[in-house]
Amino acid sequence: MAHDRHRRPHRGVQRQLRHLDPPPPQPEITEAEVRQLAGQVRQLLRGGDTEGALRGCLDTPVYNGTDGAKDAHLQTILEVLQSIKASEMSPLLKSIYGSEGGSEALDVLVKYIYKGMGGGANGANKVTPQSTGGFSQFASRPGTTEPAAAAMSVLLSWHEKVVEVAGLGCITRTMTDWRRV
């Protein structure tokens, strides 16, 4: 009898989980839409608006789209992350975090950082140093002759800064969110 009492709550939880509403459908984003956004983001970067460029990418995550659309969006985000100087990372992240929807935006950033680290579409392998007209993050890292290693270093730096600004909760939310980029 005591054995049954311990099993009842577990079965009740299972029953409750079966009755949860399915997740809402995510809007489908096409590869053409991603490429259009990438053009707008590059224009913002050329104009020196790195926060606008990053925010533009993070406000439109590709949860539902073809692999090509997801890969193209990852490449755009990696390009933006590369173009931002290390000294600008914390102020930029604090500004995004302090704005409306900032916590969610940084959660999306962590998703893309992890996807880039995992080599999603060979994310880190496709990244090459970009000419930014100034000192890039790659130039400040001696001994990184391989673009993939340099890209990983950039992603690790971003991860450190995001966690510093948004706290460890951004990692937990990223790992438990059912939406994948």
Image (spheres, grey):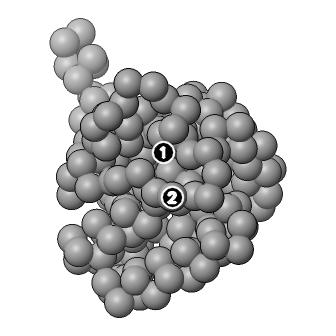
Left or right: 122 as drawn, with respect to 124:
left
Q: Which quarter of the figure has residue 3?
A: top left
The one nearer the camera, 6 or 41, is: 41
Query: Any mark on residue 120, and which?
Result: none
Point out the frontmost of discs 2 and 1.
2
Tell me if mark 2 has few (under 14), some (14-19) or many (20+) residues whose alpha carbon lies within 10 angstroms of its own.
few
Q: Which quarter of the figure has residue 153?
A: top left
Query: Any mark on residue 131, and which?
Result: 2
Point out residue 65 in the picture as x, y percentages from the top left corner. Answer: 29, 77
Tell me the quadrant of the picture where the C terminus can be found: bottom left
- The residue drawn where x is 63% and y is 38% is 86
Left or right: 39 as drawn, with respect to 45:
left
The one nearer the camera, 24 or 109, is: 109
- The residue drawn where x is 23% and y is 23% is 7
> Which element is circle 2 on?
loop
Query: Any mark on residue 110, and which?
Result: 1
